[in-house]
Image (spheres, grey):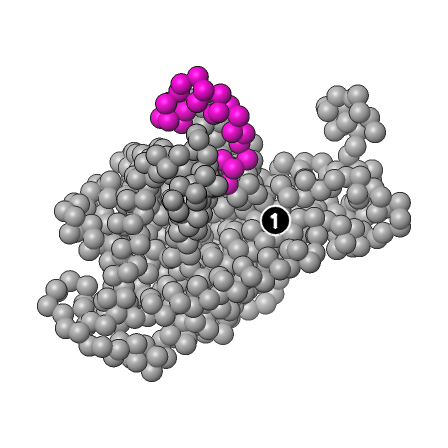
Amino acid sequence: MALGKKKDDREVQTYMKTSPKTILLYVVIILFCIVVISPLVIVFSSSLRSPENQTSPLALFIEFTGVSYIRAFSNMNYPMQLINSIMTTVGSVLCIVVFATMAAYPIGRIKTKLARFLYFFFISGLIIPSQMVIVPIAQTLNRLGVPNTRFTPMIMFITCSLPFSVFLFSGFMKGLPVEIEESAYIDGASLPKRFTSIVFPLLQPAIISCVITQGLWIWNDYFYPMVFITKKAQYSLPVGMLQFLGDKENPAQWNVLFAACVLCALPLIIVFLALQKQFVNGIAAGAVKG
Amino acid sequence: MQPKKKRKGNTSLIFTNKMYVFLIPALAMFLVFWIYPVLQLFYYSITNFNGINYDYEFVGLKNYAKVLSNGTLSNSLKNTMIYAVFTVVLSNVIGMAVAMALNTRIRFKGLFRTCAYFPALFSAIVVGFIWSYVYMPGAGMIGNLLTLIGLDGSAFNPLGNYKTALYAIAIVEIWKGFGTTMIIYLAGLQTVDESLLEAGRIDGCTEWQLIRKIKLPLISATVTINVILSVIAGLKAFDYSFIMTNGGPGKSTKTLMFQVYETAFTDMKMGRASAFSVMAFAFIIIITVLMLFYLNKREVEL
């Protein structure tokens, strides 16, 4: 069927024809999307009001001013928190990619019982919740003399990401052909050379998937920074949001609170809208490949 | 002789044991910051350690007895089970239904997909704030809507009622999570061969039969992975109990992890929290193993 046709033509031609059934489908999907998105629309519209505007948030977009944003911006010390969030996320994700691809190399390639055991050993970490082990972890860090800085949560982000990342990379590695490596071996390439110039580049789709899933989680996590960071200047965006905890049931504070929510989510929304395709593919690949 | 013989069968010339060097950084971090702390839990569970003062004593199995007798374990187990089952079932059903609707030749597919996935981008803390507003009696989004259509919006208080609070926070988790589930289902559905569906249609299958007899069996691996991911997330439930309800009203939204956190940080009873963790961990392992066995079996049958 239409084998020789270009992909573009086919997509244009094969939309569903309008029938009562398809109209019903559209109506259901549109209603569903409205229900899902409505809290976010209300939050956005309220954030654009001045803090004193106390009309019901349901009256959408009745005022446009940046006053609530300015107040939230200074309450949060936004630039500082943004930089902290970026540094933590980028640093952690870089380390995860390096450590997990390295660990997945022997696990995915060697076919012994030991390699198989290590594979399951790492995966078993997936089921351990952070809250459960947080006190012993804090003590371990303490005993090792690790000070509480903005970089302390990174240690835990990297560690917690290892089970999933090793699982993802070793699963992907099993699907990669060994022939290229064999010929490189014959040409006299050393083991590190084979890893950096053959295996690592071939892992690229899995690396994108790892960066997106783990980056999303680390950017949004508040638990480890909440436990390990004591100085306000070192807060990341989600932890900074904790200072608004008392405002959530106080309608008089909502406009500023919602402006803070938008500010907190904004960087990720921009990244998502710019890289939508990579996001969708990355999330799907992370689950399906493994 | 023995090791040499074994090696011949298992490792190749290129992929030698030298490769294990690559494991060192990851394995070191994993052992020091993840496995060692887990083992320490077993040790602390037989002490009266308070988390700060190292002059603790060994108290034997007292902590275990206390946790079992004061009802915190059974209460939070029950809450976690309800929460996990509710979120797993609904986020998978909704995620799959939306994925199937979007896998047709529909217009604006990308826009609908973005809408459904959008909540997943927000931090749990922001989501908790937004839904605290949505659920607020009277002035909140739902309360306000109820007042608009002539009902009593101030009587609507899902978070204040101990019968509904757990379900209310589970809905928040579903709202944030179903988009991710949907994207994974969409990827699975796109691997279903169109010619099989065509054959089914020629044979006179209804749309429901196509779903039940062709699509579902073919995406069973995707179902497995989605269910596993959402069960793991459900058993770890903590965020919305912590941000939105603080475990209340009463103890109706105290999940396993909320209870552990509260015992360790609020009550400063690290020994008891460790005993609690050990038992919670045993429970999580049992559930995970049972689920893996069941799903593996089912995948073959389908």
| Front in this rendered view, residue A237 or B10 | B10
Callout 1 environment at 10 Å: few (<14), some (14 to 19), or many (20+)? Answer: many
Q: Which residue appears at 14% of the width and 47% of the height? A: A145
Helix, strand or loop at disc 1? helix
**The stretch drawn in magenta includes residue A191:** yes
Q: Nearer the viewer, residue A171 or B3?
A: B3
Q: Which residues are magenta?
A: A169-196
Image position, residue A153 (x, y; %): 28, 45
x%, y% of residue A228? 23, 50
Amino acid identity at mark 1: Thr
Tell whether B86 sits left or right of B34: right
Q: Nearer the viewer, residue A172 or B44?
A: A172
Which quarter shows the N terminus of chain A? top right
Could you tell me residue B118's position as x and y percent?
Answer: 53, 43
In the rendered image, which quarter is residue A76 located in? top left
Q: Main secondary structure of the magenta part?
A: helix
The residue tagged 1 is B222
| Residue B135 pos. (x, y %) | 48, 61
